[in-house]
């Protein structure tokens, strides 16, 4: 399975062309090979260790590092443990995160706290309708030197480890699409010159589900590049009381760096070393495949309510985030429960529902939840005569 | 550690076997249910139609073995792989993927995490609960077993007589023919012809119903045979009358013309010839035998001239001929009864009181019975009986399915002389006109009719009408 096949499949889906069974077979094969290929590739890049399982000591060490990050986040954001866990998993799997929620729920504070704890370079861009791509990416500037005039590329705010795209849906599609290449390939091309972004590179975007007048909903291609889309929900009254008692003027406490860059890279390497059993890879592949209404054997509600299913990129994201989730749980391998834990955040923004779904009150999280119930962890149906 | 690894390996193998057994049972249940249904149907057919194949048909149950083998090979296509079995067991044990991981990538350091007690392994293994299998198979199996229990259909020992009317008619013909043979009325070629015709009729009516044409044939044959019997009876009667007349001539010393005397002697001779022909003279008195022998030899009846001997001979001859005449009449009536008098209900139920009587006394009894039946409500008459008669069905016709068709009498039947002599009596027969009178409303006025009217209860609304009618003031006002 090559990247071109994945992209070809993706292009077909976006154009509304029926994606054939062969394409999805390729995706299944890709998912099955993930366990073998991806860890080996990352290990070759990062550390020359064998493909053996993580040792208990390594897992313990990783958990302690993750615990430091989680503790720091919990001191900044109260009562959002699920949000913090998903954010941690997203960071560890090197994915981009889209936070959606009402104003004042702490989305921006979460990103700022994350940047403080990781000690990475951090830039914040407030997206507005008059924002231009060059305002994000940078632009060549005519510079007067002793040798004469020449254009020198002036880096935009995207050249940072952590980019906070606040209210991303308020920028025009032109500006939004400036992020496409950066998010997927972690590089920027301006006037024929390609500039590599610093590693690691994360885009943490927020968007407001209300006040949609004058906003530009993110295109599907843009959404697909976010590994997680997390809905930030309201907090309980106890949490509110805690916030009131412990925050003066709503200011967050001064956070110190919890993880160094080396430790973060070490965590990335450990995540890659988490074993993905073939049965789990098969489960991921079947789960993603089942989101497509035109694939034989997809559940009825998918055929009825889903217009377009998830892309192969979703399968890759699901596998990566499942690995991170397993490490967060202190396991050297991925289990079915790890996949289920992150499935909603990975798949929900990648499904495009039909109008009939809206009429009947089906939302993407509900579809994913139903899919998790429908798709069994074992590929074959357990015979009724021996079911325990 | 190795032991733990061995334990998990054995349990995975066990789990895999159970899962594959489940797959096999799934296919086997479908196939065996269909097969058992077919076996049940086949057994039923054998028991009802082809009884000779029982109990050999039970070998069909052995067909479950090849069905099972075929189901196994078919189920093998969908057998669980070891990886799938491990995944199932991993879920059941809730190891979070560690079992799958160690199966793919053995690691001694993590193996200890799978150190579950034996009970945990046992609980995680799939249990054998063949509910689906039983639910699929039990009904077809019960059906097949029930088909085995059902007794074989018993063929009736005696074939069902479908055409009993025709057979009865032909048997009557045979009986009459037998009587004719016994009486030696028919002999030689005539007997063979009658016999052949009756046998042909029997063959034709074995399976086919008695058609209009065949019924005519039956009647013609019957009439032909009866007429011969009647002819013999008439001869006997004439001979007896002639003997009586000659005796009375001898006693009263009357003079007859020679022609009349010759007629009487001829009639007497004919009777003796008939008796000699039928061999009935063996029981005759010696003088009668001697007379018959002389008649055979000379062809003339030689009555002794001595008045004493003549009187004795004529007296013996008269008695003998009268007995023979009565016997011939009796035989004739018997045969007639076989042919006609056995129809149940007959005319007796029509209120005319003819009954089934054979002689005079029996005829009287028949009349009485006929009257009784005629008076019984719902048993005949011009209508279906009185209005208060119970509608009793079932004795209307004992032979079900008989359709009385119009029958055409043999040609010349009407013109044939009615030579049937019921009885020779000295007095006129007594007739009961009341019994044979047509039934009408006035005949039913018996003693009980008035009491029934008197005791009849009136409904209240009718009572009031009657009271109003007989009120005294109304009577007074109407009185002039």
Image (spheres, rainbow, N blue to C red):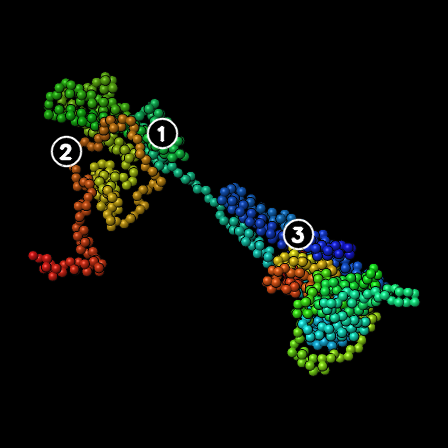
Expressed as whole percent of the image width and height from the top left, the position of residue A323 reads 75, 65
Q: Which residue is mark 3?
A: B75
Q: Nearer the viewer, residue B377 or A59?
A: A59
Going from N to C along the chain, the mark reached first, 1 or 2, is 1
Expressed as whole percent of the image width and height from the top left, the position of residue B370 reads 23, 42
Residue B198 numbered mark, or none: 1
One can see residue B350 in this view: yes
Expressed as whole percent of the image width and height from the top left, the position of residue B404 reads 32, 37
SS at circle 2: loop
One can see residue A55 in this view: no
Label 1 environment density (alpha carbons within 10 Å; few <14, some 14–19, many ≥20): many
Expressed as whole percent of the image width and height from the top left, the position of residue B177 reads 32, 29
Classify residue B317 as left or right of residue B392. Answer: left
Going from N to C along the chain, the mark reached first, 3 or 1, is 3
Quarter of the image for the N terminus of chain B: give it: bottom right
Residue drawn at 79 percent across, 59 percent down:
A37
Classify residue B31 as left or right of residue B9. Answer: left
Going from N to C along the chain, the mark reached first, 3 or 2, is 3
Image quadrant assignment for residue A275: bottom right
Q: Which residue is mark 2?
A: B427
Q: CA distance from mark 1 to mark 2?
A: 42 Å
CB of mark 3 within 8 Å of CB of mark 1? Answer: no
The residue sitting at the top extreme is B298
The answer to whether marks 3 and 1 sit on the same chain is yes
Chain of the residue where label 3 is placed in the rendered structure? B
Q: CA distance from mark 3 to mark 2?
A: 106 Å
Residue drawn at 58 percent across, 48 percent down:
B35
């Amino acid at each position: 399975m090559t990247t071109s096949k994945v992209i070809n499949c993706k292009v077909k889906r976006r154009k509304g062309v029926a994606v054939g069974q062969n394409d999805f077979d390729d995706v299944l094969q890709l998912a099955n090979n993930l366990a073998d290929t991806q860890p080996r590739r990352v290990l070759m890049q990062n550390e020359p260790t064998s493909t053996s399982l993580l040792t208990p000591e390594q897992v313990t060490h990783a958990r302690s590092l993750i615990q430091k990050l989680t503790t720091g986040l919990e001191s900044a954001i109260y009562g959002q443990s699920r949000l913090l866990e998903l954010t941690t998993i997203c960071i560890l799997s090197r994915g981009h995160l889209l936070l959606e929620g009402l104003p004042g729920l702490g989305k921006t504070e979460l990103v700022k706290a994350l940047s403080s704890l990781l000690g990475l370079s951090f830039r914040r861009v407030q997206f507005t309708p008059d924002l231009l791509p060059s305002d994000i990416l940078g632009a060549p500037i005519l510079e007067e030197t002793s040798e004469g005039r020449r254009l020198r590329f002036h880096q935009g705010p995207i050249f940072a480890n952590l980019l906070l795209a606040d209210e991303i849906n308020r920028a025009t599609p032109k500006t939004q699409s400036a992020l496409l290449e950066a998010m997927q390939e972690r590089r920027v091309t301006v006037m024929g010159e390609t500039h590599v972004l610093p590693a690691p590179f994360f885009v943490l975007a927020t968007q407001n589900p209300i006040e949609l007048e004058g906003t530009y909903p993110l295109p599907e291609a843009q959404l697909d590049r976010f590994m997680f889309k997390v809905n930030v929900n309201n907090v309980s009254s106890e949490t509110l009381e805690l916030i009131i008692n412990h925050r003066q003027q709503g200011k967050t406490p001064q956070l110190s760096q919890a993880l160094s860059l080396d430790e973060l890279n070490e965590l990335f390497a450990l995540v890659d070393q988490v074993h993905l059993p073939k049965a789990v890879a098969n489960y991921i592949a079947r789960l993603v495949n089942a989101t497509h209404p035109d694939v034989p054997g997809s559940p009825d509600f998918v055929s009825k309510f889903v217009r377009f299913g998830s892309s192969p990129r979703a399968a890759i994201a699901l596998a990566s985030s499942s690995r991170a989730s397993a490490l967060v749980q202190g396991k050297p391998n991925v289990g079915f429960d790890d996949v289920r834990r992150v499935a909603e955040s990975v798949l929900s923004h990648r499904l495009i529902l039909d109008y009939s779904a809206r009429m009947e009150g089906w939302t993407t999280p509900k579809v994913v939840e139903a899919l998790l119930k429908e798709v069994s962890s074992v590929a074959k149906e357990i015979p009724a005569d021996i079911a325990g | 550690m190795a032991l733990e690894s061995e334990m998990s390996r054995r349990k995975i193998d066990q789990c895999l076997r159970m899962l594959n057994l489940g797959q096999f049972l799934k296919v086997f249940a479908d196939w065996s249910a269909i097969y058992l249904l077919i076996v049940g149907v086949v057994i039923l057919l054998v028991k009802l139609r082809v009884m000779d194949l029982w109990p050999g048909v039970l070998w069909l149950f052995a067909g479950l073995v090849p069905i099972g083998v075929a189901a196994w090979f078919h189920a093998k296509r969908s057998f669980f792989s070891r990886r799938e079995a491990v995944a199932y067991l991993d879920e059941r044990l809730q190891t979070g993927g560690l079992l799958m991981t160690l199966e793919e990538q053995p690691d001694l350091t993590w193996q200890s995490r799978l150190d579950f007690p034996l009970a945990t392994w046992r609980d995680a293994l799939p249990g054998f609960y063949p509910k689906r299998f039983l639910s699929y198979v039990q009904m077809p199996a019960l059906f097949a077993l029930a088909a085995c229990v059902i007794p074989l259909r018993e063929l009736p020992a005696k074939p069902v007589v479908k055409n009993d009317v025709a057979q009865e008619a032909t048997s009557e013909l045979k009986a009459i023919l037998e009587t004719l043979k016994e009486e030696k009325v028919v002999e030689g070629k005539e007997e063979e012809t009658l016999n052949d015709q009756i046998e042909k009729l029997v063959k034709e009516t074995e399976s086919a119903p008695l058609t209009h044409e065949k019924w005519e044939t039956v009647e013609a044959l019957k009439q032909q045979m009866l007429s011969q019997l009647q002819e013999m009876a008439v001869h006997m009667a004439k001979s007896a009358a002639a003997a009586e007349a000659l005796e009375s001539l001898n006693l009263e010393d009357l003079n007859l013309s020679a022609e009349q005397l010759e007629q009487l002697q001829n009639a007497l001779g004919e009777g003796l010839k008939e008796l000699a022909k039928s061999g009935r003279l063996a029981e005759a008195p010696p003088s009668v035998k001697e007379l018959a022998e002389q008649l055979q030899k000379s062809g003339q009846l030689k009555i002794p001239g001595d008045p004493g001997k003549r009187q004795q001979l004529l007296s013996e001859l008269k008695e003998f001929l009268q007995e023979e005449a009565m016997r011939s009449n009796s035989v004739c009536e018997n045969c007639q009864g076989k042919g006609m008098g056995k129809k149940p209900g007959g005319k007796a139920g029509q209120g005319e009181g003819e009954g089934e009587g054979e002689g005079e006394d029996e005829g009287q009894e028949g009349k009485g019975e006929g009257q009784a039946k005629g008076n019984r409500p719902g048993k005949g008459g011009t209508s279906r009986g009185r209005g208060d008669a119970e509608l009793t069905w079932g004795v209307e016709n004992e032979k079900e399915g008989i359709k009385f068709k119009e029958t055409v009498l043999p040609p010349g039947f009407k013109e044939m002389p009615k030579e049937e002599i019921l009885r020779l009596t000295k007095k006129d027969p007594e007739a009961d006109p009341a019994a044979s009178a047509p039934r009408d409303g006035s005949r039913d006025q018996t003693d009980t009719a008035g009491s029934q009217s008197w005791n009849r209860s009136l409904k209240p609304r009718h009572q009031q009408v009657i009271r109003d009618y007989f009120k005294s003031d109304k009577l007074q006002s109407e009185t002039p």
